[in-house]
Amino acid sequence: MRFKVRGIYDLEFFLYLKRIGVKNFAFDLRPTSFNFTPMYKIIEMLKAGGDDSDTYSFIFDGEKDFVIEQLISSAQKEGLLSSKNCFLELGDLKELNACSRFGLPIIWRFNESMDYRKIPNETLLHGVSFTYKYFEQLQESNQLYIFLKEILDLKRDDQFIDLRLDWSDHLSESVLDFLPANTYGFEINQQVEKSYRHIDMNLVSSHLEHAKRILNLES
């Protein structure tokens, strides 16, 4: 299954996702995020269910590079992460150069205020993450095809596209048919929580099954 679930903060839920076939996980290390998870909790999850074929992303946004280094090195010392299964997910282009010294592949979280034509030719930049809503807006203004053509012309063969979906998105074939996405990500929020930080696992599973049918993904 090519889904990614972002903002995982609970061991039970992490193991549940693995049981239903999710292989890509993202942990939020932004202190202001409702899904912020301390590194020791993340290590606990990785130890409990780590798998060589799983991938893990660490979401940062504007943190000092020494903070990132401290957090990542603590996980690497446990032998849980490597450049093959670990990604840094960053929101600021300025962070790319600073974080390249860690030797880990990087995913850039694009937003429309940034000029995608200025994406640096950074060897470790392996993925660009877009929201589905942004592509939907481009489709409504008849700009989607032009935008994707420019992106694909800029993209290296070893780079991938990550599509960030919202649980409430009404997925349209007229948009999806154009998108060469490699992973489809959902982020934990109140739409799939019974209460604060209390996830409705059955609802998450139902959403993923529905999205899998629309996206025509294999299990």
Image (spheres, helix red, strand yellow):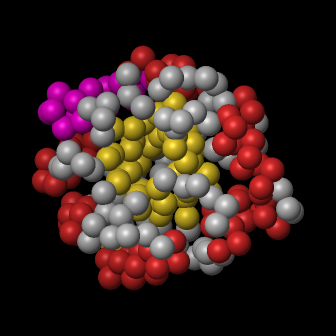
Pinpoint residue 85: horizontal percent, then vertical percent. Answer: 30, 40
Residue at 19% x, 38% y is 80
User: Which residue is depicted at the point 42% across and 17% down?
Assistant: 101
Foreground of the two, 29 or 205 = 205
Range covered by the magenta-colored residues: 60-81
Q: Is residue 65 left or right of residue 114?
A: left
Report x, y in % for residue 194.
38, 80
**Quadrant housing the C terminus:** bottom left
Left or right: residue 24 versus residue 100 is left
Quarter of the N terminus within the rendering = bottom left
Q: Position of residue 49 (x, y in %)?
A: 16, 54
Q: Is residue 61 magenta?
A: yes
Residue in the picture at 40% in, 60% down:
2
Residue 108 in the image: above or below residue 124: below
Residue 8 sits in quarter: bottom left
Give the residue furthest to the right: 141
Residue 132 inside the magenta-drawn segment: no
